[in-house]
Image (cartoon, helix red, strand yellow):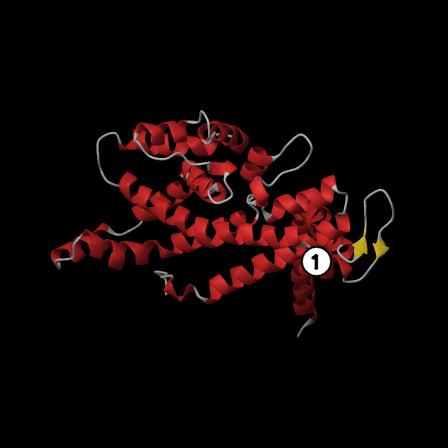
Amino acid sequence: MSVMGIRIERGHRERRWRELALGIAFISPAIIGFLAFTIYPVLMALYYSFTDYNILQPPLWIGLDNYRDLITRDKTFKIAIWNTLYMVVIGLPIHLVFDFLMAMLLNVKIRGRSLYRTIFYMPSITPIVATAILWLWIYNPQYGLANSVLQALGLPTIGWIADPFWSKPSLIFMGMWYGGNTILIYLAGLREVPAELLEAAELDGANAVRRTWHVTLPMVSPVIFYTLIINMIGYFQYFTEAWVMTAQRSGAAGGPLNSMMFYTMYLYQNAFQFFKMGYASAMAWILFLIVLVATVVLFRTSGWVYYRSE
């Protein structure tokens, strides 16, 4: 290579390094924020999970004692695990199916469709705390709206969130109130279903159910998979509704017999009420591993998802 060629190559290399340095400089605030507010707290939580740490005193290294106590001795931890899995395994599928059916109905070309869509979406922009307080009144066993409707229909009243048997189903039913975001995502997916495919299926004699099963569902399966992942992670972190509806001035929460004590609620209590930060950090890492495993399993079993590009 000639001297001129070497100089040109060196010039190109220097320009690429300058562009790289300039790019890093532009995104450095985001990198610094990510390292300071995400990576550092995660690593510190991992360290604290192996310590006895109450915030006021330096952490004391105790090895795996926090994890051992959680798994072998803490009964409330097991209740919180059960309640959370109940919501993930039972509540999540009910919500996803309900939201998809509502999206199908709202996708039908009828008069006033935009108004109906607005009505169903409005609860989603209502603060969750306000929604929880509203449903506290609806579920009141003595003078709530739900039992008034049951009495008017001649049916027996229910204890709702005051009854350990009905408390979690009550939360699942309440969750249908603010499924507008998921419905909106489904609607966007349904609009992308090619009309010619539905028309071809109809010409072949497929009824509405078969068209939905064999055409619509496969075409929106990536959207369904996305909402499944996002909502599953959200259900593992179920907190606000149950906390607002059960928290007392004394700091106790969880409803009757801890039937509404969810994982993140117990984690919050350990961290900021009992000042057992090391214990709470161990809980946080166990939750992280559970969510990670569940997410990997869902991705490994996602063969039912159809991507048009494949």
In-front residue for pair 122/235: 235
Whole-percent x and y of residue 304? 37, 64
Whole-percent x and y of residue 43? 74, 55
Residue at coordinates 71% horizontally, 45% vertically from top-left?
270
- Of the residues shown, which amino acid type is indicated by label 1? Arg
Residue at coordinates 66% horizontally, 66% vertically from top-left?
9
Residue 66, visible in the rendered structure: yes
In-front residue for pair 128/114: 128
In-front residue for pair 41/262: 262
Callout 1 crowding tier (Cα within 10 Å): few <14, some 14–19, many ≥20: few
Q: Which residue is mark 1?
A: 73
Residue 229, visible in the rendered structure: no
Residue at coordinates 38% horizontally, 41% vertically from top-left?
184
Q: Against 71, is 272 above or below?
A: above
Residue at coordinates 25% horizontally, 53% vertically from top-left?
212
Residue 8 is left or right of residue 307, and the answer is: right
